């Protein structure tokens, strides 16, 4: 029930946690049993915030994808991205890194050499976006949008005043009259929002489907309490009121046009056609896919399981 006594207006997704590399906790919020996707977003992982000890290796070696775009966004720390296109890109806080897998790509995410062997902070989000069926087998590509290249606007909370200013960074898509330089295959929205402490702010419906997630701060959404690390899927086509506590709050909004049809996911492969997933699994097991220049290690796939 909501605080006002009516039916809840939001759908809550708490996610589930797993520990990687002995010290890095990852919370997987999407897909959930009750909500497989929000707009085109089909996968939502939150990791950190954590200070990793020097001996912890968080390298993710070469692994393949098909049928999706990966979206990496960091609040703290860094990764070194390499892929089979020849891309070598340091991923830094505030930047967007958008890799389109299409018919197939291989990539790795490693600790930057300057940070290896010392304590390091890490906090961020790893998301997947399903490609439209007609583009699912497109040529792979990679886009990097530096933090300074992403538009930033200020919105006014209530009551008015300088202390009631809401910061919005448009990471992907278009909102409040500004557009991100990141190119997408379907209407997609990804915002980084900072709320001031105290005043409420009305978030308009900016996408057909949208959800919010605050990694570290509690919020109220139309008078319903939302805990940190809990996703709220918002009512379609309606504005909601957001309010932070005494510390303020930082949150992200994800959303966009709903999927034209459900997709299947197995390991790192996404498709509306199960035969393409099975072929990708066989290709990877047989040593297929283009290699990452300068890298030889490959993460093996789990055992193939045929689903009815």
Image (cartoon, grey):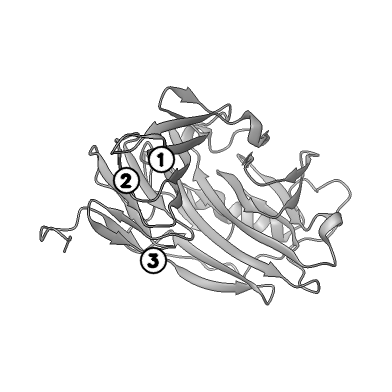
Q: Where is residue 1 in the image (x, y as percent from the top left)?
A: 16, 64
**Left or right position of 25 against 165:** right
Residue mark closest to the camera, 1 vs 2: 1
Give the class, few, some or many, for how many residues have Cα within 10 Å of label 1's Cα (few <14, many ≥20): some
Q: Earlier in the sequence, mark 1 or mark 2?
A: 1
Query: Which residue is denoted by mark 2 in the rendering?
Result: 199
The one nearer the camera, 35 or 51, is 51
Q: Position of residue 129 (x, y in %)?
A: 50, 44
Q: Which of marks 3 and 1 is nearer the N terminus?
A: 3
SS assignment at label 3: loop
Q: Residue at x 66, y 60 (%)?
A: 122
Give the distance between the C-alpha atoms of the residues marked 3 and 1, in whole angstroms: 31 Å
Q: The C terminus appears in which quarter of the rendering? A: bottom left
SS assignment at label 1: helix
**Left or right position of 308 against 204:** right
Query: Which residue is denoted by mark 1 in the rendering?
Result: 163
Q: Which residue is drawn at 33% across and 41% down?
A: 209
Q: Is residue 228 above or below residue 221?
A: below
Give the class, few, some or many, for how many residues have Cα within 10 Å of label 3's Cα (few <14, many ≥20): some
Query: Which residue is denoted by mark 3 in the rendering?
Result: 14
The one nearer the camera, 126 or 265, is 126
Q: Where is residue 17 in the image (x, y as percent from the top left)?
A: 50, 72
Q: Earlier in the sequence, mark 3 or mark 2?
A: 3
Q: Which residue lies furthest to the bottom in this view?
A: 22
Q: Position of residue 115 (x, y in %)?
A: 82, 59
Q: Which residue is drawn at 24% across and 37% down?
A: 237
């Amino acid at each position: 029930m909501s605080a006002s006594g009516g039916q809840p207006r939001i759908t809550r997704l708490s996610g589930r946690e797993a520990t990687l590399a002995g010290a890095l906790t990852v919370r997987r919020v999407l897909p959930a049993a009750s909500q497989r996707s929000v707009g085109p977003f089909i996968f939502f992982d939150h990791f950190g915030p954590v200070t990793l000890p020097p001996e912890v290796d968080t390298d993710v070696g070469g692994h393949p994808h098909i049928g999706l775009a990966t979206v990496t966004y960091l609040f703290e720390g860094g990764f070194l991205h390499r892929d089979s296109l020849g891309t070598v890109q340091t991923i830094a806080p505030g930047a967007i890194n958008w890799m389109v897998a299409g018919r197939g790509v291989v990539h790795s995410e490693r600790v930057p050499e300057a940070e290896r062997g010392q304590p390091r902070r890490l906090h961020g989000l790893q998301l997947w976006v399903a490609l439209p069926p007609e583009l699912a087998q497109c040529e792979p590509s990679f886009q990097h949008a530096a933090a300074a290249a992403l538009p930033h606007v200020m919105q006014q909370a209530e009551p008015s005043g300088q202390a009631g200013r809401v910061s919005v960074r448009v990471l992907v898509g278009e909102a409040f009259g500004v557009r991100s330089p990141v190119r997408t295959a379907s209407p997609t929205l990804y915002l980084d929002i900072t709320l001031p402490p105290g005043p409420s702010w009305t978030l308009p419906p900016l996408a057909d489907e949208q959800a919010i997630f605050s990694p570290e701060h509690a919020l109220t959404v139309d008078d319903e309490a939302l805990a940190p690390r809990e996703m709220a899927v918002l009512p379609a086509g309606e504005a909601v009121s957001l309010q932070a506590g005494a510390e303020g709050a930082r949150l992200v909004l994800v959303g966009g046009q709903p999927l034209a049809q459900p997709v299947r996911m197995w390991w790192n492969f996404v498709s509306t056609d199960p035969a393409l997933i099975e072929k990708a699994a066989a290709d990877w097991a047989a040593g297929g896919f283009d290699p990452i220049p300068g890298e030889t290690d490959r993460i093996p796939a789990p055992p193939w399981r045929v689903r009815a």
